Image (cartoon, rainbow, N blue to C red):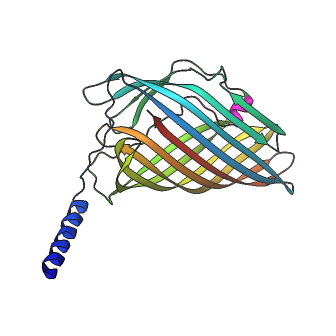
């Protein structure tokens, strides 16, 4: 009798293990519908320190915002066109270098300014057009606020099962004092399994990667050269059936240098730590 129960228990465990191993495969894609409206809540926190002429300078940016997007069209090939705009925004900027301690709340130059985006069913941005131009003050730029910066997770065009990975490289360019800084992000995503999140059955996707930056600019007649790199990691939750990005949590650390040439030459070391989150609001 005991042997029978033992064998029965072992059989159940084997069947459960088989079910876990058989999870998937998954073919992930964004499946928004025409007329659908989604709202996302975002939070960000950035701490930065640099040493200049023997003195440490620190800055911190903390903020929260809400944006909505409305799907205008879904083509036969799955391309999705939507318009998004920021509905509310709060940001606090504190900088010892600029002797600044300021709070920005719902700035007129950014709130409600629309951007139209067309992306593929895998989330690859095909086209992006600013509908209403934003006006960003110097403090807003210091806080890292930019128009036309929202984008979704880019999915692979292949079936996935638990344990599978895929790589994605992304380049972003920022204007800097008459020059530009190019930020490259190389990320590897891994399927960690299914999980219930915010009422959705989601696929949990972990990510690890490396961020590098390089660029140059001008400030007060001095030439600036930027260079740095650091690790990044995060977790994304993607609703399998609905084809929606439900949540993302990410963080990164960057060690960089700023080489200054002009009347006085110097190299400034800089450390930056950033945490971000994005959540689909019901």
Q: Is residue 144 within the magenta segment?
A: yes
Q: Residue at x 51, y 43 (%)?
A: 171
Quarter of the image for residue 240 reads: top left
Residue 121, placed above or below residue 13: above
Tell me the magenta residue range. 138-150
Residue 206, given in percent of the width and then of the height, sits at 43, 55
Q: Nearer the viewer, residue 141 or 71?
A: 71
Coordinates of residue 40 in the picture (x, y in percent): 49, 33
Q: Residue at x 74, y 32 (%)?
A: 103
Tell which of 107 and 8 is nearer to you: 8
Q: Nearer the viewer, residue 152 or 220?
A: 152
Residue 73 in picture, x, y percent from top left = 34, 21
182 left or right, relative to 12: right
Horizontal side of residue 133 vs 240, given as left or right: right
Residue appearing at x 34%, y 39% in the figure: 122
Q: If the image is split into quadrants, where does the C terminus sit?
A: top left
Q: Quadrant of the N terminus?
A: bottom left
């Amino acid at each position: 009798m005991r042997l029978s129960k033992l064998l029965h228990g072992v059989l159940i465990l084997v069947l459960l293990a088989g079910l876990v191993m058989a999870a998937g495969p998954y073919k992930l894609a964004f499946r928004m519908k025409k007329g659908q409206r989604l709202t996302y809540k975002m939070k960000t926190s950035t701490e930065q320190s640099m040493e200049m002429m023997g003195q440490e300078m620190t800055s911190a940016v903390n903020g929260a915002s809400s944006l909505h997007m409305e799907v205008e069209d879904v083509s036969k090939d799955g391309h999705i066109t939507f318009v998004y705009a920021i509905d509310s925004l709060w940001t606090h900027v504190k900088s010892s270098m600029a002797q600044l301690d300021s709070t920005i709340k719902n700035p007129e130059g950014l709130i409600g300014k629309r951007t139209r985006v067309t992306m593929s069913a895998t989330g690859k941005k095909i086209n992006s057009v600013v509908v209403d131009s934003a006006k960003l003050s110097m403090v807003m730029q210091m806080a890292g606020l930019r128009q036309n910066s929202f984008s979704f997770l880019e999915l692979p065009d292949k079936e996935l099962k638990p344990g599978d990975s895929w790589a994605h490289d992304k380049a972003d360019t920022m204007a800097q004092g008459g020059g530009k800084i190019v930020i490259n992000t190389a990320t590897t995503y891994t399927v960690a399994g299914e999980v219930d999140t915010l009422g959705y059955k989601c696929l949990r996707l972990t990510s690890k990667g490396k961020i590098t930056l390089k660029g140059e600019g001008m400030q007060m007649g001095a030439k600036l050269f930027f260079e740095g790199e650091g690790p990044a990691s995060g977790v994304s939750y993607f609703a399998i059936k609905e084809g929606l990005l439900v949540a993302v949590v990410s963080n990164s650390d960057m060690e960089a240098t700023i080489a200054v040439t002009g009347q006085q030459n110097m190299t400034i070391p800089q450390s930056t730590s950033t945490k971000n989150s994005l959540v689909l609001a019901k």
